Amino acid sequence: MTRPARAQINLANLQHNFSRVTQAAPNSRVMAIIKANAYGHGLVQVAQALAAADAFGVVGLDEAIGLREAGCESRIVLLEGTFSSADIALVCGYHLDVVVHALHQVELLERARLTRKVDCWLKVDTGMHRLGFAAQEVPAIAQRLSALAGAGTLRYMTHFACADEPGSAATGTQLACFNDITQGVTEQRSLANSAAILAWPDTHADWVRPGIMLYGSSPFADRSAAELDLKPVMTLRSELIAVHARHKGAAIGYGAAWVCEQDTRIGVVAMGYGDGYPRHAVSGTPVLVNEKRAALAGRVSMDMLCVDLGVNSDAQPGDEVILWGDALPVDEIARRSGTLAYELLCGVNRRVCYEYT
């Protein structure tokens, strides 16, 4: 019998969230960010469902090649670019775009024998101070990329540090910096991530790059996904595999970290940190058992977690448990666990059975 831990992926909700991108930025092309196995949702399946996207953003060649070998003919952009000369042959062979953010990547392209034209996205550091060229370096780098023997189309991009904080001045400062650097260029430009798509319309430019909003999570701490008309794509489900009556004072799980304050019924769920549920989730974190809220009780184990069902619960082994998704936003679980929805979604692994609807 198959273990009941499963992730149900609602592709219709994914497509709905994509439509929210096009509604918010109707004049921009869309690079759907599907790195990290599409934020844990399944790389190929998500790409196939988002066929309307103008491009896909991934990090590694493994993801890019996987998409190509699955039949994806869309533009694919390597967001961290290339790492070695061997990568260049694969970029050419699989018809990939590359982000160029460092001098050594320019030099790799200059030394390479390009067998086709390679489109480059020149990354500008406007204040994130993670990747990209400083303002004074950009003109010379652009000239070198344009002079490549196999030069394709050049585009400019940057990344925001604080777009998820609508009251921050940082995004406006970065936008002004990018506009100054690219003033007078005719090439296409890209700035906006999910937060900027929704909160900073002046940043939309030629291309937007939605990530977390595609998967139904809010990029903002103070606005829910439902308020933004985003629908959950992943519902993480399992079942109760045991239910026990426990008396007041009984300690539950490793370290005896949680003690029953009264007589109650404790359910054991087939889901643990070995599946990707956060080990650091605290007691009281909600789950849904038969569509009713119950609370995590004690430490999350590798394969199981315990929940306080309440003394009057009629739940039985085999009853459904929702860890997040429908009626229980992943953002809420992330907050209770002291982390972000990004980490929770990306952490679900292939020990969990994936089902696509």
Image (cartoon, helix red, strand yellow):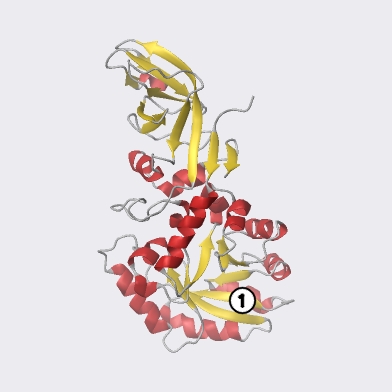
Compared to 134, does 314 lie above or below? above
Identify the element where label 1 is drawn.
Answer: strand
Q: Toward the viewer: 105 or 6?
A: 6
Name the residue that disc number 1 marks.
119
Q: Toward the viewer: 276 or 41?
A: 41
Residue 103 at what x, y percent from top left? 55, 74
Residue 189 at what x, y percent from top left? 47, 77
Q: Is residue 114 left or right of residue 301?
A: right
Q: Is residue 158 visible?
A: no
Residue name at image x 42 percent, y 70 percent? 25
Question: Quadrant of the rendered structure where residue 171 is?
Answer: bottom left
Residue 77 at what x, y percent from top left? 58, 67
Identify residue type, mark 1.
Answer: Asp
Q: Quadrant of the C terminus?
A: top right
Compared to 240, does 86 lie above or below? below
Q: Is residue 349 left or right of residue 235?
A: right
- Number of dots carrying numbers: 1
Q: Going by the picture, which residue comes out furthest to the left? A: 167
Residue name at image x 32 percent, y 53 percent? 227
Residue name at image x 54 percent, y 50 percent? 11
Residue name at image x 30 percent, y 60 percent? 165
Q: Is residue 316 visible?
A: yes
Residue 240 at what x, y percent from top left? 48, 23
Q: Quadrant of the N terminus?
A: top right
Q: Toward the viewer: 114 or 238?
A: 238
Q: Circle 1: is it few (<14), some (14-19), or many (20+) Cα within 10 Å?
A: many
Question: Quadrant of the rendered structure where residue 337 is?
Answer: top left
